[in-house]
C-alpha cells in the first residue's frame, strides 16, 4: 500500500474520458485496454513515485503509458503526502497543456 494519497486535476477526467471514447470508437475494447494501462501506471506511480523522471518543467514527473501515445504527468507533494496528477497527456498535443496547477 502506498504512503501517498492521489489527487487529480479537475480536467484530468476529461483527458481520460476523451481518450477512452476515442479508442472505443476505433476498436471495441481498445478503450478498456487504455483504461487498464493508465490504471496500472498510476498504481506504479503510487508505489514508487520517484521512479519516473522530471522532464522539461521542474517538479513535474512524466510516465509513459504502455502501448499508447500518452503520458501521466504528476507532481509529488512529499510533506502533504499526495501525488497530484495534472494530466493524462497525448504526445501530439501542445506540451504546455500537460502542466496544470
Image: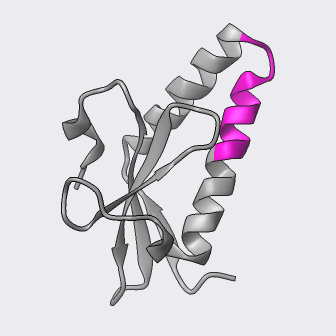
Determine which quarter of the picture holds residue 67: top right
Q: Is residue 49 left or right of residue 27?
A: left
For the point 37% across and 47% down, the residue is 10
Give the percent coordinates (x, y) of residue 69.
51, 31
Up-down relation of residue 98 to residue 43 (above or below): above
Q: Residue at x 62, y 46 (%)?
A: 38
Picture layout, residue 69 above or below residue 83: above
Residue 14, image x and y in percent? 45, 33
Q: Which residues are magenta?
A: 27-37
Q: Residue at x 54, y 26 (%)?
A: 19
Tell whether position 31 is magenta: yes
Q: Nearer the viewer, residue 51 or 12?
A: 51
Determine the main secondary structure of the stretch shown in magenta.
helix
In the picture, measured across the screen, residue 7 lies left or right of residue 38, that is left
**Looking at the figure, which quarter contains the C terminus?**
bottom left
Q: Position of residue 36 (x, y in %)?
A: 73, 44
Q: Quadrant of the N terminus?
A: bottom right
Amino acid at each position: 500500500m502506498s504512503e501517498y494519497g492521489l489527487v487529480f486535476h479537475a480536467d484530468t477526467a476529461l483527458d481520460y474520458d476523451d481518450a477512452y471514447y476515442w479508442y472505443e470508437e476505433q476498436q471495441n475494447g481498445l478503450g478498456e485496454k487504455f483504461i487498464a494501462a493508465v490504471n496500472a501506471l498510476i498504481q506504479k506511480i503510487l508505489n514508487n513515485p520517484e521512479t519516473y523522471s522530471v522532464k522539461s518543467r521542474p517538479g513535474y514527473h512524466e510516465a509513459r503509458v504502455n502501448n499508447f501515445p500518452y503520458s501521466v504527468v504528476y507532481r509529488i507533494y512529499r510533506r502533504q503526502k499526495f501525488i497530484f496528477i495534472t494530466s493524462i497527456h497525448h504526445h501530439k498535443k501542445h506540451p504546455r497543456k500537460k502542466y496544470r496547477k
